[in-house]
Amino acid sequence: MAGRGWRGDLALAVLAPALALCLALTGWLDRADEAVYDRAVLRGSVEGPAPVVLVAIDEPAFLEFGEGWPWPRSRHAALIESLRAAGARTIAIDLLFTDPTTPEADAALTAALGPDVMLAADVARIDTPQGVITQPVDPLPAFRAAGAGVAQIALPLDEDGAIRRLATDAAALAPRLAGRTAPEGARIRFAPGAIPRVSYYQALRAATDLPPDVFHDRTVLVGFALRSAPLTAADTFRTPLTTAGLGLTPGVEIHAHATRSLIAGDWITPLPRGLTAALALLLAAAAALPLPGRSALGTATLTTALALVALGGSVALLSFGFWLPPAAPALAALAAGAGRAGLDLARERRARREITRIFGQYLAPDLVRHLAAHPEQVKLGGERRLVTVMFCDLRGFTRLTESFSDDPETLTAILNRALTVIGDSVLENGGLIDKFIGDCVMGLWNAPAEDPDHADHAIAAARAAVAGIAALSDTLAAEGLPVALACGVGLNSGPCTIGNLGTARRFDYTAIGDAVNVASRLEVMTKELGLPILVGEGCAALTRHTALREIRMTAIRGRTGMVRVFAPADGDQPLPRPAQQVPAPMREA
């Protein structure tokens, strides 16, 4: 049964790595990877005091001031002075001051600015039929002349429109505030609750409304953090925080998380795609590898475990600051495993059909169903096994043939009835009908299924056959067919080679070995000794429930040495009925 699905194995061996590489290197699964990332990266907490504080222009501040936007720049000047007095290290204002307002308000803000203040700048991009026009959007010259720093506030968008990556431009806001940049592609470590938040109006009165250490020696970012107002709709973005049910994230809050990540050196480094491809190849190979004795269910279990390894490993790496996209390795394992499970299932079905075909007519139905459900327990290619062999030959069949030479239908019917009696005796006692040889039946015990009482069951089958043929002879006489039938049975046990023997087109499951030869000779010897059943010494040594008497020592034609011959005696111990047997552990011949 093995080896017939090599084409499927070959196809899977080619397709599984090709699929793994395709999934890992093309980026088709980037969206799925990002969905996993957005949920996994938020697990865990950030230790230590936050180096960044967010001053939010939020709903409570608007309620406190009782006026709409824009607020006078003199109020921003007062905020800067309040934060400076509270010990803020750096103050970054995520607002664009590109146009003048009143002279008094602009003058107040200019006076408050200094090297500890960072103002926002941007680049406007306008698409035209002739191309893209870029226009710098900078703070007023007077503000820059006052000594304030300027940083770009543009945020790098991923292909799905979310923000996960750190800006690597040294002129960007977070690198300017942190004084360092991260490697290309590094990601912000978003952590819910990691950024302390204070309303604008509270920060404006920090000396009286807040504890003295809220801003001390910390970087402060000021900007819009409204949850519902359309005023800041263009400055909110989807981030991993969004998947936690926190809505779109304000731009200033993203800058705060980016700044914290850079100051703490706590960013996420994506691992190279080549490593993802290698893992995808490894898991696909593990899922697709044909293993002896593995069932389709076992393959499905292994495949699920491999996919979970990819997912769990990716999540675990995040805690160490690395990101390995899991979708390609997991899907490669699932796809390869599905292919392997399909091949395994097809093999199992072929094995069941093969077992049913081989044993369906020669074993009891319950045992055939058991073997078909567990084809891995049957070894048809050849093995060495201790077995008991029975040869049962009809007596009087030659005279029967002469009597019904002109009536072949009756002759065939009588023979079939006799063979049915013998065959049923074998099956009902847990044996295998090895073959029909004319008017002789060869039975086999302890193969393909294990039977610890195989010698006793074989003797019981012999007795049942002898009694059944005698009863059939009486039945035929009562039917007006004066046929005198009897049978002679030879039994022996010993190690034999069993398996499918024959040609590639025609073969049988049978046994060959010395025990077979001795049992055949003993069947012939029953005529000489006038006994219906003769048992060889190999079988006699294995009986546990059957009383035997020794008949003689005799030579067996074609075999050197003498053999002790036994026959059943009265006073047998009760013999347990053969249960549905479990195939024995297989050993190579």
Image (tube, helix red, strand yellow):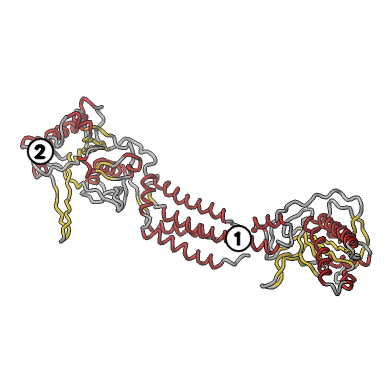
Q: Which residue is mark 2?
A: 110
Asked which secondary structure carries label 1, the reply is helix
Whichever of labels 2 and 1 marks the residue nearer the N terminus, that label is: 2
Residue 85 located left or right of residue 21? left
**Residue appearing at x 26%, y 36% in the figure:** 53
Asked which secondary structure carries label 2, the reply is helix
Picture coordinates of residue 283, whole percent (x, y): 48, 56
Q: Is residue 321 visible?
A: yes
The quadrant in which the C terminus is found is bottom right
**Inter-mark Cα distance, 2 to 1:** 84 Å
In which image quadrant can residue 486 be found?
bottom right
Mark number, residue 349: 1
Residue most extreme to the bottom: 406
Picture coordinates of residue 462, whole percent (x, y): 85, 59
Query: As rendered, which of 256 and 4 lies closer to the eye?
Result: 4
Mark number, residue 129: none
Type of amino acid at the residue the image marks with label 1? Arg
Query: As rendered, which of 492 and 444 lies closer to the eye?
Result: 444
**Vertical order, 111 against 408 (above or below):** above
**Vertical order, 30 against 527 (above or below):** above
For label 1, the crowd category at 10 Å Cα-Cα, with few meaning under 14, some 14 to 19 and many 20 or more, is: some
Tag count: 2
For label 2, the crowd category at 10 Å Cα-Cα, with few meaning under 14, some 14 to 19 and many 20 or more, is: many
**Residue appearing at x 69%, y 64% in the figure:** 358
Query: As rendered, which of 545 and 194 lies closer to the eye?
Result: 545
In which image quadrant can residue 362 be found?
bottom right
